[in-house]
Amino acid sequence: MASPNIGVLAIQGDVREHVNHLTACGASVTLVKTPEALANISGLVIPGGESTTMSILAVQNGLIEPLRAARKRIPMYGSCAGLIMLADRIADGRSDQETIGGLNITARRNAFGRQVDSFEIDLKIDVIGKPDFHAVFIRAPLVEAVGAGVEVLAQIEEGTSIQVVAVRQDNLLATSFHPEIVEDLRIHKYFLEMVKSA
Ligand code: GLN
């Protein structure tokens, strides 16, 4: 597959930033606003934004069940709110908040607290190699619990505390941070490799 066609869920969030990164990596991109648009893509990116709003709009647009079906068929990558959308369980969500699910994790929304609700840190991520990745967190979720089948790709270690911020399970990839707003394309390239080998 020379140039895969990647969908970006385009109902809310930082859609354009992901489109720019995917295009820079050589992919063609389809904006996904309807279930029909899921038919011709070989991977899907779920952007950062606000997962409660994204959930409501996905339900209103009849997208939740088609997205759940699609994630069994094609690789998906979620950044920040997108990570929450791919989580099987949410802590501190709205009571009626729906997710696509598939990642056997509990995602705690806005987990880093008010004082540090935005921060940047250099992360060691073995699957993309050196150097460390400059990760930007904006009202980010934390992967609070990791279940069977989930591979931890990145974590923040401070003394004895370990905070999981990037995971993969089979064809699903998720980061608490926003690679779409830094110039480094390595997370998007890693996802495109997942798509090519799916
Ligand atoms: N706090 C947001 C949520 O709960 C996520 C923030 C983000 O995507 N930057 O969905």
Image: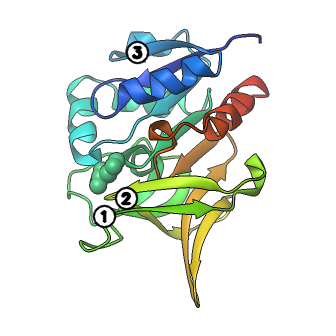
**In the rendered image, the vertical position of residue 39 relative to residue 75, given as above or below:** above
Q: Are marks 1 and 2 in contact (CB under 8 Å)?
A: yes
Using the rendered image of the protein, determine whether residue 176 is visible from the camera's viewpoint. no
Q: Residue flagged by tag 1: what amino acid is it?
A: Asn
Q: Secondary structure at mark 3?
A: strand
Place residue 171 in its image quadrant.
top right
Disc 2 C-beta below 8 A from ligand 1: yes
Q: Is residue 191 left or right of residue 11?
A: right
Give the position of the N terminus as an image quadrant. Answer: top right
Residue 100 seen from this side: yes
> Between 27 and 103, which is closer to the camera in this rendering?
27
Tell me the residue that label 2 is attached to: 140
Residue 168 % position (x, y): 65, 51
Q: Earlier in the sequence, mark 1 or mark 2?
A: 1
The C terminus: image quadrant: top right
**Position in image of residue 181 (x %, y %):** 44, 39
Q: Residue drawn 22% across and 31% down?
A: 57
User: Ligand 1 within 8 A of label 1's CB?
Assistant: yes
Distance between mark 2 and mark 3 Cα atoms: 24 Å
> Looking at the image, what colour scheme do you see?
rainbow
Q: Which residue is mark 1?
A: 110
Label 2 neighbour load within 10 Å: few <14, some 14-19, many 20+: many
Q: Compute the Cα span from label 1 to label 3.
A: 27 Å
The residue depicted at 28 percent of the width and 26 percent of the height is 11
Image point (41%, 57%), residue name: 137
What residue is pinned by disc 3? Answer: 31
Report the amino acid beneath label 2.
Answer: Ala
| Amino acid type, label 3 | Leu
Query: Badge 1, how many Cα within 10 Å: few under 14, some, many 20+?
Result: many
**Dot placed on the residue nearer the N-terminal end, 2 or 3:** 3
